[in-house]
Image (cartoon, coloured by chain):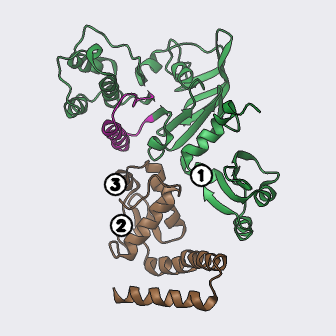
């Protein structure tokens, strides 16, 4: 069963398309990593799912319903992001106590244990927290609410390395105990790639790739060797990235539709074949130019 | 633990190899229940679907068998199957790489064989 379903979703802000005919379908009880560059449309997509605003055109369904102005969606989706508006007049403890009234699966004891583990004091106010502590507190809300769909938009902003890994561990353990649908957006694929089941790659408002993360590692392959040999072997293939640091040598990332036999032959021809790490592949796939930042310095 | 999580090799393949090692080392015997996907997810801090994929590779190769509602169990001849698989695939590939590197370095066949024998003596001493 799919929890999120969208077709041709488009959202424009002041003439700029934040989402441009975006389509996807997210299955129940999966953890999906939403990956894209700054301004790719990640947050816009998530806000539409959470019912924060309406799309300009296209279809979107969450639990088979339109999310905007929808009670079912509001009660069963929690959207955690770094601009979360929490009541400034309530202490952290009061906020935790209030959550139970809004979210039916709220686990008071679990929230309390996390609260103590991360050394919060009950009388503190959210506004007085540091950036990292705010993110940590928001994370507690997101985990303990156990909503059917939980969305974390860049949840680890400002967290130190130890808290980040604690957060991911807590998320995984609680997901194992209470399976639910989770969408996690991040710039850092390497941090979440072992945690997620599927990856949804977004570029310039469109979905680029939506596949199991396990398949991503085999989706592309790196060829390195003498330029003319590499060119010969990658001719007619879908080239994702190419780089020539050493003269006469070429490194090319291509879509991996080679057979085992072909790869063996390429090796014999003197090409060294390597896996491409998921995060590098995502950088290559989402980059706007083929040459990257170096293009700025090459005046031609 | 034993998995190289930041490496480029797929985690589920590393996981299935780790499970094979557990069986080879005798930590799991024939007809014994092996870890569930959720236990593996917890142990290695990975998504349960990835863990399931690692288990399923071994089930497809009949190194593990499924009992409905009870989980996965080690097949009777699991050890032999793993050993012959490793010999035919992993070892053969490693030998191929050694031979290719030897060619690149102009190491003669005799020289290579001598090197292997020397290493073998060292290993046997340990």
State the SS at label 3.
helix
Where residue A131 sits in the image (x, y, percent)? 34, 22
Are there few (<14), some (14-19), or many (20+) residues within 10 Å of tag 1?
many
Chain letter of the residue beneath label 3 in the structure image: B
Apparent side of residue B41 relative to residue A276 in the rendered image (left or right) = left
In the drawing, what numbered circle is on residue B43? 3
Query: Start and end of the magenta stretch?
Result: A153-181
Residue, disc 2: B33
- Image hue for chain B: brown
Apparent side of residue A286 relative to residue B67 in the rendered image (left or right) = right
Are there few (<14), some (14-19), or many (20+) residues within 10 Å of tag 3?
few
Residue A212 shows in the view: no
In front of the other: B14 or B28: B14
Q: Choose top left, top right, bottom left or bottom right for residue A35.
A: top right
Is B84 situated above or below B28? below
Instruction: Evaluate whether label 2 is on the same chain as label 1.
Output: no
Instruction: Evaluate whether label 3 is on the same chain as label 1.
Output: no
Q: Choose top left, top right, bottom left or bottom right for residue A109.
A: top left
Chain letter of the residue beneath label 1 in the structure image: A
Is B35 situated above or below A37? below
- Image hue for chain A: green
Q: Identify the residue at image location x=17%, y=20%.
A: A122
Q: Residue A164 colored magenta?
A: yes
Q: Identify the residue at image location x=35%, y=37%.
A: A164
Chain letter of the residue beneath label 2 in the structure image: B
Which numbered mark, 3 or 2, is in the foreground of this view? 3
Where residue A125 sits in the image (x, y, percent)? 24, 15
In the drawing, what numbered circle is on residue A285? none
Which numbered mark, 2 or 1, is in the foreground of this view? 1
In front of the other: A83 or A62: A83
Residue, disc 1: A276
């Amino acid at each position: 069963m799919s929890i999120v379903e969208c077709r041709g979703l488009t959202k424009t802000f002041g003439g700029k398309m934040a989402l441009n005919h975006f389509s996807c379908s997210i299955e129940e009880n999966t953890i999906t990593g939403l990956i894209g560059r700054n301004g790719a449309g990640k947050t816009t997509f998530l806000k539409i799912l959470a019912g924060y605003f309406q799309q300009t055109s296209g279809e979107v369904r969450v639990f088979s319903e339109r999310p905007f102005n929808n009670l079912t969606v509001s009660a069963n989706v929690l959207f955690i992001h770094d601009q979360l508006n929490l009541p400034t007049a309530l202490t952290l403890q009061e906020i935790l106590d209030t959550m139970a009234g809004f979210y039916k699966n709220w686990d008071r004891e679990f929230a309390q244990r996390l609260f103590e583990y991360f050394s919060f004091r009950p009388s503190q106010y959210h506004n007085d927290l540091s950036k990292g502590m705010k993110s940590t507190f928001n994370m507690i809300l997101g985990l303990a609410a156990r909503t059917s769909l939980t969305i974390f938009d860049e949840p680890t902003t400002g967290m130190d390395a130890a808290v980040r890994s604690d957060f991911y561990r807590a998320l995984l353990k609680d997901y194992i105990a209470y399976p639910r649908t989770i969408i996690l957006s991040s710039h850092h694929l390497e941090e979440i790639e072992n945690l997620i089941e599927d990856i949804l790659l977004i570029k310039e408002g469109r979905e680029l790739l939506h596949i199991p993360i396990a398949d991503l590692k085999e989706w592309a392959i790196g060829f390195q060797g003498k330029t003319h040999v590499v060119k010969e072997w990658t001719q007619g293939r879908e080239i994702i990235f190419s780089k020539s640091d050493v003269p006469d040598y070429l490194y090319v990332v291509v879509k991996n539709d080679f057979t085992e036999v072909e790869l063996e032959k390429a090796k014999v021809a003197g090409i060294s074949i390597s896996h491409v790490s998921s995060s590098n592949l995502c950088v290559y796939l989402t980059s706007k130019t083929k040459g990257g930042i170096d293009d700025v310095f090459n005046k031609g | 633990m034993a998995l190289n999580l930041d490496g480029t090799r797929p985690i589920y393949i590393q996981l299935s190899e780790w499970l094979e090692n557990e069986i080879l080392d005798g930590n799991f015997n024939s007809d014994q229940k092996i870890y569930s996907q959720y236990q593996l997810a917890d142990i290695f801090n990975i998504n349960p679907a990835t863990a399931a994929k690692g288990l399923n590779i071994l089930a497809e190769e009949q190194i593990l068998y499924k009992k409905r509602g009870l989980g996965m169990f080690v097949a009777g001849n699991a050890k032999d199957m793993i050993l012959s698989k490793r010999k035919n695939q992993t070892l053969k590939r490693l030998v191929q790489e050694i031979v290719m590197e030897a060619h690149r370095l102009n190491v003669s066949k005799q020289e290579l064989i001598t090197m292997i024998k020397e290493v073998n003596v060292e290993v046997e001493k340990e």
